[in-house]
Image (cartoon, rainbow, N blue to C red):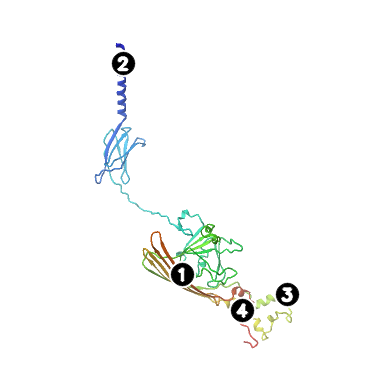
């Protein structure tokens, strides 16, 4: 019995020794550091400061954040580690623990001078439809033009402005007369029988005319001549099939979207511009004069029939009449026909005036223009009077009232049809004015 008691007593003593040694080991491995973080300039407590423990390898072991009073308490792993204090807008601080249990830190504000500040914003562009999207999100083939970059082009209609400005857009002038129509194709001809003319949209409204203007009707009035280039703000050209998603089958040949100038929240501003242009016809290829023409006729006759020309029976005997004979003056001349149908130069005058302004709710743009152009061909002329009134009124953030009123009065005077081609083919032996039997 005595031996059994001694056995239990020894076991209890052993357990107590083990428990005490375990508590000592835990006490040696657990070390708490506490302290407070304040602002140097004011002495106020700094809440939200990040406090982390780093070892000699600069690895993060533990971390904590100061409370509303700037106090912190962190259980560390080793007394030889360091504490690092950081907060946005403050200079970072590092302190070695070195066995200390209380570490108070004073932090100061970090003032940084910026050499340059760059502000980047997304620039929405027109999709050619009824919304604006960012350029990086643009997937359709859309070419945009700013008319402020094309104001110096001496043009009376929009088709003349578009020449050579957009890749894939081909503009062919059907005639050199002022105001004459042109053939416009986007990425070539897309139809054999239904035409290839693109759809014209002005301020989200399709712009159509009843007159067909193409190479078969070169003297027709251009459908774009009624739109003054000075009233246009931007032009978007929709090239691919995405245009049909907005405008249906009418946009199968492409769409030219025109946005006119609108009012702005500025004081009333008056703009007056004037332009004078001079057109000088280009001299064509050298043509035969009357004497050369008669020589070529004689050679052609000899090459065809192998014999000389019978001046008694041939219908071209009038080319070889003696001077003073009847009809001599009507068949023996040296006429250069291009000089007879063309003027030395064609004068153009263009005058425009506009008033733009508005406030927070109402904005307006009023414009008036007059254009007079004399073509290089005698008898060709264009007179145009145009006016436009754009009014925008914002009723609420979700409702806006827009009103667009435009007027265009155009008078086009043309010469003979295809007069330029005729002047190149007409025989130079013929006179400009034919003599009658009385020599008049």
Please give the count of numbered marks on the rendered protein.
Answer: 4
Label 3: which secondary element: helix
Instruction: Residue 310: give x, y in percent of width and height.
Output: 74, 79
Out of 234 and 428, give the one closest to the viewer.
Answer: 234
Q: Residue at x 75, y 76 (%)?
A: 307
Camera-side residue: 379 or 376? 379
SS of the residue at dot 2? helix
Q: Which comes sooner in the sequence, label 3 or label 1?
A: 3
Q: Which residue is mark 1?
A: 406
Whether pointer 4 and pointer 2 mark residues with C-beta atoms closer than 8 Å, the reply is: no
How far, Cα to Cα, is label 2 from label 3?
A: 152 Å
Q: Earlier in the sequence, mark 4 or mark 3?
A: 3
Mark 4 closeness class: few <14, some 14–19, many ≥20 residues within 10 Å: some
Q: Are marks 2 and 3 in contact (CB under 8 Å)?
A: no
Q: Residue 328, position in %: x, y? A: 66, 84
Q: Nearer the viewer, mark 3 or mark 1?
A: 1
Asked if residue 258 is positioned above or below residue 11 in the image, the reply reads below
State which tag comes first along the sequence, 1 or 4.
4
Tag 2 residue: 8
> Going from the N terminus, do you reach mark 2 or mark 3 first?
2
Which structural element holds mark 4? loop
Above or below — where is 411 with respect to 261?
A: below
> Disc number at residue 335?
4
Q: Residue furthest left?
A: 43
Residue at 64% x, 86% y is 436
The residue pinned by badge 3 equals 302
* Mark whose residue sits in front, 4 or 2: 2
* Above or below: residue 303 compared with residue 330: above
């Amino acid at each position: 019995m005595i031996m059994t008691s001694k056995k239990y007593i020894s076991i209890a003593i052993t357990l107590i020794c083990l428990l005490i040694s375990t508590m000592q080991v835990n006490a040696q491995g657990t070390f708490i550091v506490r302290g407070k973080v304040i602002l140097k300039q004011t002495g106020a407590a700094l809440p939200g400061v990040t406090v982390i423990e780093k070892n000699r390898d600069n690895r993060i072991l533990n971390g904590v954040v100061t409370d509303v009073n700037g106090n912190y308490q962190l259980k560390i792993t080793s007394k030889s580690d360091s504490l690092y204090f950081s907060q946005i807008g403050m200079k970072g601080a590092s302190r070695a623990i070195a066995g200390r249990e209380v570490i108070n830190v004073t932090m100061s504000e970090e003032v940084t001078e910026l050499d340059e500040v760059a502000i980047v914003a997304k620039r929405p562009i027109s999709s050619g439809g009824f919304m604006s999207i960012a350029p990086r999100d643009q997937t359709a083939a859309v070419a945009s033009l700013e008319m402020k970059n094309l104001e110096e082009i001496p043009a009376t209609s929009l088709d003349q402005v578009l020449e050579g400005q957009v890749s894939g857009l081909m503009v062919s002038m059907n005639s050199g007369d002022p105001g004459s129509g042109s053939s416009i194709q986007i990425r070539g001809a897309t139809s054999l029988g239904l035409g290839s003319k693109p759809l014209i949209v002005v301020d989200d409204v399709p712009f159509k005319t009843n007159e067909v203007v193409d190479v078969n009707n070169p003297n027709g009035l251009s459908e774009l001549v009624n739109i003054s280039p000075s009233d246009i703000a931007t032009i978007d050209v929709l090239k691919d099939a995405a245009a049909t998603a907005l405008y249906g089958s009418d946009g199968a040949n492409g769409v030219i979207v025109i946005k006119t100038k609108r009012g702005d929240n500025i004081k009333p501003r008056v703009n007056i511009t004037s332009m004078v242009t001079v057109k000088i016809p280009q001299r064509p290829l050298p043509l035969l004069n009357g004497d050369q023409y008669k020589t070529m006729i004689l050679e052609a006759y000899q090459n065809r029939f192998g014999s000389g020309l019978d001046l008694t029976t041939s219908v071209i005997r009038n080319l070889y009449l003696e001077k003073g004979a009847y009809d001599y003056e009507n068949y023996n001349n040296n006429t250069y026909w291009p000089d007879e149908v063309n003027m030395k130069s064609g004068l153009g005058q263009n005058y425009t005036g506009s008033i733009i302004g508005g406030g927070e709710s109402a904005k307006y743009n009023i414009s008036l223009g007059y254009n007079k152009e004399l073509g290089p061909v005698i008898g060709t002329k264009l007179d145009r009077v145009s006016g436009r009134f754009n009014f925008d009124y914002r009723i609420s953030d979700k409702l806006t009232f827009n009103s667009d009123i435009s007027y265009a009065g155009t008078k086009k005077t043309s010469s003979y049809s295809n007069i330029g081609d005729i002047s190149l083919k007409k025989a130079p032996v013929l006179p400009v004015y034919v003599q009658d039997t009385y020599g008049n």
